[in-house]
Amino acid sequence: MFKRLTIAGLLFGMLAAAPPAAARENCGVRETVVAKLQNSYSESLVAGGLQGNKNVQTMVEVWASEKTGTFTMLLTSAEGVSCVVAVGTNFFTQPPVELAEGLKG
């Protein structure tokens, strides 16, 4: 019984440590990542914003292509390192929804 718990704990620990290592493989200098998105996938920047606090901020970017329907989400650090955090297909945009008069702030 103890052996099984130990093995399960080791396997779980190895699996839990795997995503950060994989995430580092999806990172690079922003200019290089952007060039790849533009040249290989015909994507361009369609949305973005800052996230974080006073000490650490990253830029969230959404790159997409109307031509191919693909999209990529990047997190970019202040040091200029971009990491791909999501990719997908069938990208679409949604026009802003007009709020009723009573609901406007």
Image (spheres, grey):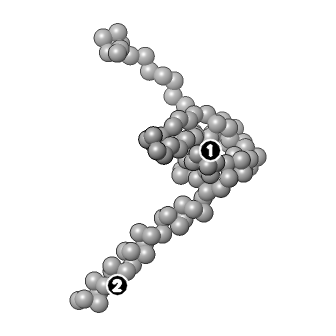
As helix, strand or loop, the secondary structure at mark 1 comes to: loop
Q: Residues within 10 Å of mark 1 (few under 14, many from 20)?
A: some
- Picture coordinates of residue 13, whole percent (x, y): 39, 74
* Left or right: 103 as drawn, with respect to 1: right
Residue 45, numbered circle: none
Farthest residue toward the right?
39
Q: Residue at coordinates 58% horizontally, 45% vertically from top-left?
A: 78
The residue nearer to you, when weighing 94 against 63, is: 63
- Picture coordinates of residue 94, whole percent (x, y): 51, 28
Q: Residue at coordinates 48% horizontally, 64% vertically from top-left?
A: 19
Q: Which residue is mark 2?
A: 7
How far apart are labels 1 and 2 at the CA level?
A: 41 Å
Quarter holding the N terminus is bottom left
Residue 8 appears anywhere in the view = yes
Residue 90 appears anywhere in the view = no
Amino acid beneath label 2: Ile
Amino acid beneath label 1: Thr
Q: Residue at coordinates 54% horizontally, 65% vertically from top-left?
A: 22
- Answer with the quarter of the image where residue 54 lies: top left
Q: Residue at coordinates 45% horizontally, 70% vertically from top-left?
A: 17
As helix, strand or loop, the secondary structure at mark 2 comes to: helix
Q: Which residue is mark 1?
A: 70
